[in-house]
Amino acid sequence: MRLRTSYDLRFEIAVPTPFILMLRPRSGSQQWIAREEYRLIPNVPVHEFTDQYGNLCQRLIAQPGNFEIHTVADVLTTDEIQEARGAPFVEIQELPDAVLVYLLPSRYCESEDFGELALSVTDGELPGYDQVAAIEAWVRRTIRFEPGSSDLPVSAAQVNARRYGVCRDLAHLGIALCRSLSIPARMVVGYLNGLEPMDMHAWFEAYVGGHWYRFDATQSTHVNGYVAIGYGRDAADVAVYTQFGPAVYPEGQQVRVELLE
């Protein structure tokens, strides 16, 4: 599958404002970046670095006035939907070092509070992939997906209590339930072809059977058309932009995903 993703942001800056952006997808086992365009208007010096999760990040200082960010990427994604019923739980001592961080509670995923619920949700399931699939299905049935219902991240405990949320909120709950069973889980942010309404999207991945597998409780079935931009423990690690100083908010933004023949 060949997709063209684009994201446009426009700000009105009052004082010199430091930004960290996370808007460049990187090639990996599930996607290949065939072409990329990244424009800043006006152009400013940019320092790019790779964070502790492997995400491509850009540091810059936006000057007073109109500031625009335009990104386009042509991405080749796998045609196969990755499912692995029966993929086993990986014993802690066998996990790669870089995966261990995704076992721990984090700001929005209070996994230490979900052990009893996770055992109930996954009762009778084989340890590993089947447990995560049961968690995904339970979140889909139990938590109402309401796009636009919150602007700020909501923790797993909060969304479990109120029973509705945006995509990142459902992902937080899925991650917390997985980690409470000692299954590594991480948040992913990016694009999804055909998402309605179109916006940046969030889902989660779990590490079972020696691989990361995608899970998304906002979708009724597993679908193709995902393009990942950032990975992290929760929403605190995967903001597509972070600014410092007096708060500024986008005066305009547009997300587009196009299927290329």
Image (spheres, rainbow, N blue to C red):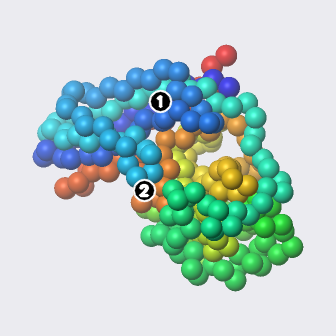
Task: Give, as a three-letter code, the residue at label 2.
Answer: Asp
Q: Position of residue 73 (x, y in %)?
A: 49, 26
Mark with earlier residue (1, 2): 1
The residues tagged by marks 1 and 2 sit, at their Cα atoms, a distance apart of 21 Å
Residue at the farthest front position:
93
The numbered disc on residue 237 is 2
Q: Is residue 193 visible?
A: no
Residue 40 vertical position relative to residue 126 in the rendered view, above or below = above
Q: Position of residue 11 (x, y in %)?
A: 27, 40
Residue 84 vertical position relative to residue 160 in the rendered view, above or below = above
Q: Position of residue 234 (x, y in %)?
A: 49, 60
- Left or right of 148? Residue 143 is right
Q: Residue at x 75, y 78 (%)?
A: 119
Task: Give, as a three-letter code, the residue at label 1.
Answer: Ser
The numbered disc on residue 6 is 1
Q: Point out the image quarter for the N terminus.
A: top right
